[in-house]
Every structure is written in structure tokens, then in C-alpha cells.
Amino acid sequence: MTIGLKGPGLYIQGEGELDKLGKYVRKMGHTFLLICSPNNQKRIGGRIAASLQQAEKTMVYYQFGGECSKAAIQTAVEAAQAAGCDGIIGAGGGKAIDTAKAVGTNMGGLPVIIIPTIASNDSPCAGVAVIYNEQGVVVKALMMRRNPDLVLVDTGIIAGAPKKYLISGMGDALSTYFEARACRRSGAKTMARGMCSATALTLAKLCYDILLQHSVQALEAVEQHTVTPELEAVVEACVYLSGVGFECGGLAAAHAVNDGLAHVPQAHGASHGEKVAFGLLVQLQLEKASQEEWDTVLRYIRQIGLPSCLADLGIVDIRDEDIRAVASASTVPTQFTKNVRADITADEVYAAILAADTAGAHH
Ligand SMILES: [Zn+2]
């Protein structure tokens, strides 16, 4: 059996850590391209520039336009080349971060520094960037030469962001353990080029345990815009454990159903984490999970305010052809549903979606 483990070179998390950025990147380059939206530039650009300046580093700002497309990546590469950048910083929620990963990779593997401004998904620590076309449709997943050299999470910034983002991050992190466990059982290959190791499974389980224990208090902290030990624990779960957990532990039906839901326009308003949370309920149906496990997950989903049924995702008018489309997209050969069981059919997923919807609906 082969196992593989990968993760960011350095992970830093804490309140006020952004102001120490210059210290952490001392050996990572001299001139950095900062890729972020005008909003985030206003919010934290000054602090990033000041910290880099203190360390005698130079920063060049590249205004991110909102889409991680081939064209946007190419323009950013040219800006980095023109300014002689030897390091790339991506700050934001998802797409700006992925653009930074792609720019660093396409420039021969320049050091990449990721600064998440919200904890809404499992991507910051991962060595993959999702590329879209100009219409916002996924084109491909670009594998980086290596994971980001530094992921720096300032919990003060996360605490200052709207609560809905952390709720999404919790939904994404909730599935990590169950997807890793499915891969462990089936012997599936992970993005870390091995099978789900004992290490990965343990990290994924820790992620789940932290969520169950501290999520309610973490959300209260975000409502007050304060950093508490509970918030710090949950941010570690949502950003580090969920990211390393999915990359080294593997993905399964929960993420496949999330991808499949892209085919239903009514669900377009739902976030990645919200769709993954419902996808987990579908996976538990496929796995015929114990009643106790189902009850625990459903209770959590409802307590946090994640979707437990199709209506919660925005699918109020349940059309048979839509659910069939989700089921068949989740079971194409490239999808992760096979990591639950190799021979799962679209009909089984279709039935599991409806069963999850019925059992998760509010009565
Ligand atoms: Zn995810």
C-alpha cells in the first residue's frame, strides 16, 4: 500500500499575524505580486504593503477582476514579469487565491503565499487551482508543482467577515472525514498520490470532532467580531484540517454531488460548502450510515444553518430531470462517487438524493 502526504510549506494562524507577513516571507523573495480584489486591497492591502516594506520587500498590486480564467492568469503573469516579481501573494476568498496559485505555477514554481480573508472553503492549503472560462464554467483543475509555500490566516480578519462565509466553510469541512473514510475503505487514490493514510484519516476525524464541539461558539464569536479559542479551533479545522484532509484523505460522493448540482440553475445561489453539506447527506444515504451517525450530522447541519434538503438549496420546484442530471453528473467515470463504491449507478445516487431530501426536510 502506498500512502502520500502533502500540505502547505508553512501554515500560520492567529490574530494580527498579517502584520508579521514580512518576517515570514523573508526567504521567499524580494518583489511580490499581490493579487486581490479592489475591496480586499482597500481592506488589507495597506497592512500587507507596510509589513513587506518593514522587511525591505517590494510589493506590486495586481487588481483581480473576479474570474480565475486563462486570460486573467496570463495578464497577471505578464504583470509579474514586467515588475520582476519573484513571489506571488493571493489574498481573498477563492478565485483570487487560485489565480495566485496558477500564476506561481506557470512562472516555473515561484513561491506562492496565500492569505484567506474568509474561511469559506477548503482550498487555501491545497495544491490545486480551479480554472474557469469567461462564462464562469469550470475548465480544469490545475495541479501546482507544490502546495503554497505559506498559508497565513489572520483570525482577526476572519472574525470581521460575515458569518455566512464561516458557515460555508463548516459545510465544506463537515464532509472531510466522511469522504476520507470512504476512500480509506475503498482504497481510492488521493491527490497526494497514495491512499488515504492513517495520518490523513486522523486529521479528517479531528476536523469533524472540532466542528461538533466548537462550531456554535465560533459562530457567536464571529457575530461579535471577536477572536476566541473556539473560533481559532474552527478556523484551523476549516482551513488547515479540511484542506489537508481532502487532499491527503481523498474526496467521495459529497463533493461529486456538489459538482453535479452545478447543473441545476435553482441551486446557483447556494455556496460550495452548502452544496457539499447536502452532498454529505446523500453520501450517508449511499453508505447506509448508521441512524446515530445520520442523526448527529443532521442535527449539526440544522444547528449551524446549513441546508438539509433540496428546498434549502433553493430547489423548491423539484423536477425529475434536474435530479437525474445531478445523479448522472455525479457518477461519470472522473467523479469521486466511485470512491464510495466502484459500481454505484446514477439510479442509486438519484434515489439517495430523494431519500436525503425526504429525511432532511423540515416537517
Ligand atoms: Zn470543498
Image: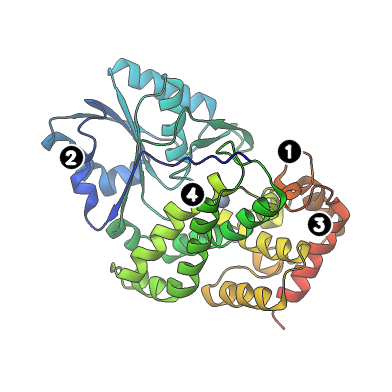
Q: Residues within 10 Å of mark 3 (few under 14, many from 20)?
A: many
- What residue would you read off at disc 4? 243
Q: What's the CA distance linking mark 4 and mark 3?
A: 26 Å
The reply to whether dot 4 and dot 1 touch (C-beta < 8 Å) is no
Which amino acid does the dot numbered 3 rest on? Val
Dot 4 or dot 3: first in sequence order is: 4
Which amino acid does the dot numbered 1 rest on? Thr
Label 4, secondary structure: give it: helix
Label 2, secondary structure: give it: helix
Circle on res. 334: 1
Dot 3 or dot 1: first in sequence order is: 1
Q: Quadrant of residue 226?
A: bottom left
Dot 4 or dot 1: first in sequence order is: 4
- What residue would you read off at disc 3? 349
Q: Is residue 175 visible?
A: yes
Which amino acid does the dot numbered 2 rest on? Lys
Point out the image quarter for the C terminus: bottom right
